[in-house]
Amino acid sequence: MSKSILINEVGLRDGLQIQPKFVPTNGKLEIALGLIDAGIKSFEAASFVSPKAVPQMSDASDLFKSLPKNDNIYYSALLFNQKGYERAVESGAKAIAIALASTEKMNMANIRMSLPDAINNLGRLIKMAKKDGLDARAYISTALGCPYEGNVPTETVINLADKMFELGADKIAIADTIGSGGPALVEEVVGKAAKKFGAENLIVHFHDTRALGLINAWVALKVGVTEFDTSLGGLGGCPFAPGAAGNLATEDLAFMLNDAGYETGIDIGKIREAVLIAERYTGQKLGGRISQWWISQERKKAASAASAAE
Ligand code: COA
Ligand code: ZN
């Protein structure tokens, strides 16, 4: 029996935020349109944060306003404070994502708040979102390991998720910000969270730093998770989390899911086209773990087209 899986594309936010070359708004839009053409229906499209802290996100309002609005496409906006919230609402966002880290030190490094302050802050932002009729997604970053404090006890993650649901979050994302988690830890943490809160209320967010993104996703899938954050071409990383590498690539996850008979609605060949657009704007060579295979397929096609033309 096939099952539908939602891929939430975070390339325009998590993917681009660490890129040194500014991608102009029309470039971001071109990438988004390529992804929509490939079947992507859910995006974390930008973060409304201080442009001094993350210059790549300085055009979040312009981008949000220019994205095609369509009831079938869901856009969320990452933010951390009231100013970000107001900018997101003014730009037409219907869903917000608010992140806090599982550890004291990571919260200080990322948003200059202690963990208790970050929880209160998250509660205030969720309350505003609920009052305004917006979806509120709450992210637990560094849930599978912190670059400053190391291992994170499972109980910490479960307790934070519990608190976030109590504060009104619609969904909770368990985020492995630096890619330090492996399948055993995912089974433990995501498995426990799925049992306690219902897998349908969870999102998982993996980085592929140590080549475990896909197996981690497979384990999350097997404990019932149906929503995954990924980034086209494996773009990604957090400027405030040393050691973070790219996100699990959209094409890698979509390929694995399509191959296993899950419904993603995603056309892998068209994701390749969107990756090429992103390469052009970032000036980086991109591509998930299937990119070598992609290239060899293209070479084969070109060779057979050439011999047919002879
Ligand atoms: N949008 C635009 N500008 C913002 C802003 C927002 N959401 N939040 C703060 N600012 C600006 C303020 O206007 C102020 O500008 P000024 O120096 O010109 O007066 C400056 O940023 C500092 O503001 P302050 O309220 O003192 O906040 P802060 O210095 O404590 O910063 C954060 C807190 C979290 C808003 C800021 O550090 C930030 O945006 N960090 C980015 C976090 C991030 O994106 N991490 C990666 C993703 S996980
Ligand atoms: Zn991330």
Image (cartoon, rainbow, N blue to C red):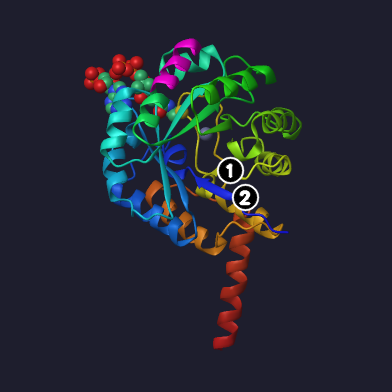
**Is 58 on the left-hand or right-hand side of 210?**
left
Residue of label 2: 253
Measuring from the top left, give residue 265's x and y in whole percent.
Answer: 56, 60
Looking at the image, can residue 166 be seen? yes
Q: Nearer the viewer, residue 301 or 247?
A: 247
Residue of label 1: 228
User: Disc 2 on helix, strand or loop?
Assistant: helix
Looking at the image, can residue 206 be seen? no
How many residues crowd around disc 1 within 10 Å: few (fewer than 14), some, or many (20 or more)?
many
Where in the image, quadrant-wise, is ligand 1 located? Answer: top left
Q: Is residue 115 magenta?
A: yes
Image vertical order of residue 88 relative to residue 259, above or below: above
Q: Nearer the viewer, mark 2 or mark 1?
A: 1
Amino acid under label 1?
Phe
Where on the picture, by quarter, is residue 184? top right
Image vertical order of residue 23 relative to residue 33, above or below: above
Does the residue at mark 2 contact the one at mark 1 (Cβ under 8 Å)? Answer: yes
Q: Quadrant of the N terminus?
A: bottom right
